Amino acid sequence: MMRAFLLATVGASTWAVAAPVPPPSEKELIAKHWGKPEGEGQFELKGKQLTLRATGDGPADMRVTRTVRGDFTARVTLADVATPAKGDARQPHSHAGLSIKGGGYSLSHYLLQLYNHDNNGELYDTPQRSVWTDRFIDAQGGGGTSLKEVEQGQTVYFEVTRKDKTVTVSYSFDGKDWAAPQAFGEKLDFPDEVTVSVYLSHCTCQKLHATFDGFTITPLKK
């Protein structure tokens, strides 16, 4: 009897060790391939695409963030994005793209959808859509520049490169032909360690979303 009991125990232990490892959860996959989720809303992973979906309870700032050291090139594809409706904010707008922050400095490279006013103070029926770049210094403020108009439903590829204290941005509409890099971060004294985020923000009370694909951060050789 004792021998039979030992054999049964060994068999049970072997079975326990050989049990299959459960697949990673959606939260674990997002953290591994995209970054740390921040902000209120839903982070939905479908295949290799990540959708940031705002709740509609008010203005939102949703992002997934990675910490990066040294020089790098970050890229992401904005595969789909909701267009804000006019009417529930003084000047409804949304941002979706890439940002870099560190040491009191920030640079954002994104698709801007913004309803402007006409001469009578009324909002236009359709928003301005453009590739936009902002840079800010916490103690001084900052500003932005429109780089290219974007058609409704058009896929936008974003690129941000940090090299030798200079940050350049570029964009593409097919992932092959890229606009000439433009320097916007030459006055931003980023520290060696920065955070890189894929983000969606808006000023409305709408359930907006943005779907991203192909988020990569490639270290650059000195």
Image: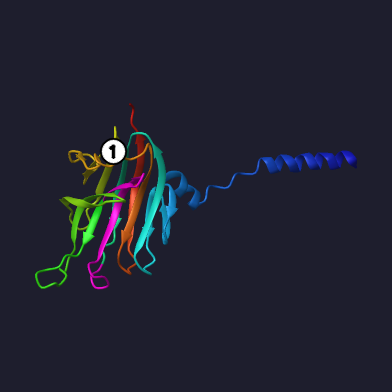
Q: Amino acid at mark 1?
A: Thr
Image coloring type = rainbow
Q: How far from the left and from the top, in percent, is residue 2? A: 89, 41
Q: Which residues are magenta?
A: 85-109
Report the quarter where the C terminus lies: top left
Q: How many marks?
A: 1
Residue 91 percent location from the top left of the image = 22, 67
Furthest-right residue in this view: 1
Left/right placement of residue 83 relative to residue 124 reads: right
User: Could you say whether the residue bearing mark 1 is in a helix, strand or loop?
Assistant: strand
Towards the viewer: 34 or 222: 222
Q: From the top left corner, tell me how far across and down residue 10 is, in percent.
A: 78, 39
**Furthest-front residue in this view:** 139
Circle 1: is it few (<14), some (14-19), or many (20+) Cα within 10 Å?
A: many
x and y, in percent, of residue 30 in the image: 45, 49
Asked whether 88 falls inside the magenta stretch, the response is yes
Predominant SS along the magenta part: strand
- 91 shown above or below 165: below
Q: Is residue 11 magenta?
A: no
Question: Which residue does the image show at 30% across and 37% down from the upper left?
Answer: 162
Please identify the residue farthest to the left as the structure is shown: 119
The residue drawn where x is 17% and y is 38% is: 180
- Residue beneath disc 1: 161
Choose between 21 and 125: the one closer to the eye.
Answer: 125
- Say which quadrant the N terminus sits in: top right
- Which residue is nearer to you in this view: 177 or 140? 140
| Residue 145 falls left or right of residue 49 | left
